[in-house]
Image: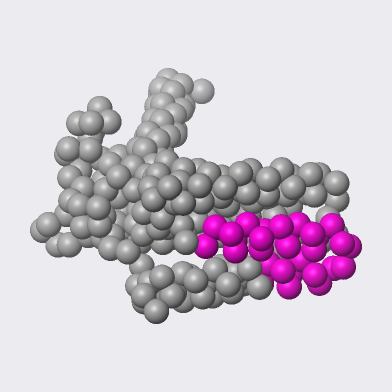
Amino acid sequence: MSPTSGMRDGMGQRGLRGGIERRGLRDHVHERILELLLSGGLEPGTRLGIDTIARELDVSPTPVREAMVQLERTGLVTREALKGYRVAPPLGAEQLAELFDARLMLETTATRMAVPAGPDLLDELRETQRQHARAGDAVAAALAQGRVDPALTAEYFAADTAFHDVILRHSHNRYLWQMSETLGAQIHRMRQTALQGVPDVEEAVAEHAAVVEAFAGGDAEAPVTAMHRHLENVRERSLRLETGS
């Protein structure tokens, strides 16, 4: 064995370990910034200073810069030369239409792959549907009193996401799941405009119930039809809200 072979091996291991540690830090920073963006606490156009974020997270600017590059790819932040990063503006009508085209293809495929529904899928769907309905009741009650509660709205959307995630998980396709995570950031971005109120609670809750009923019925095409109808209705309501028509 060469006198330096052990040294080279040790350096290689430290280099590998260092790479893993750096990647872990970058991912952690990415998650923290993503949480901030999806919380609705930052207005579109808000400047995102790399040095400021690095100080707040007690990290160097490097993992923040790397995280921003990732977030720019999702469309959640934009970058201007010599000006840095800013919170992206809300999705426009054309972007919304494209987003729902992608969501329709993804989720109807996942629904088809989740058929036939086993007991676990049905149990999870029923539970998440109940949670979504309860959250919807709370949002509707607040609106009936003339007030909008952003925390209740966020809880409602979290329950909505959980319902759809059950079906995606039960497609048992890791790549569909990964694609859904990418779309999920854009769906959250779309929902930021709705944090001041959800006008379609009753319709969405009823449509989720119809999806559950379709899965329970045993007809292989019924769940796909119910999911397609639900997403088309959400698309129509979202575009109507965007255009004010």
| 77 left or right, relative to 140 | left
The foreground one among 62 and 241 is: 241
Q: Residue furthest right?
A: 218
Q: Position of residue 133 (x, y in %)?
A: 63, 49
Q: Is residue 22 above or below residue 189?
A: above
Q: Is residue 142 visible?
A: yes
Q: Position of residue 125 (x, y in %)?
A: 73, 49
Q: Is residue 17 above or below residue 215?
A: above
Residue lying at 44% horizontally and 29% vertically, measured from the top left: 17
Residue lying at 38% horizontally and 72% vertically, measured from the top left: 242
Q: Quadrant of residue 234?
A: bottom right
Q: Is residue 214 magenta?
A: yes
Residue lying at 51% horizontally and 75% vertically, measured from the top left: 236
The foreground one among 212 and 224 is: 212
State whether the magenta stretch is mostly helix, strand or loop: helix
Q: Is residue 112 visible?
A: no
Q: Quadrant of residue 19?
A: top left
From which residue to which does the magenta span run?
200-228
Q: Is residue 111 magenta?
A: no
Q: Residue furthest left?
A: 82
| Colour scheme | one colour
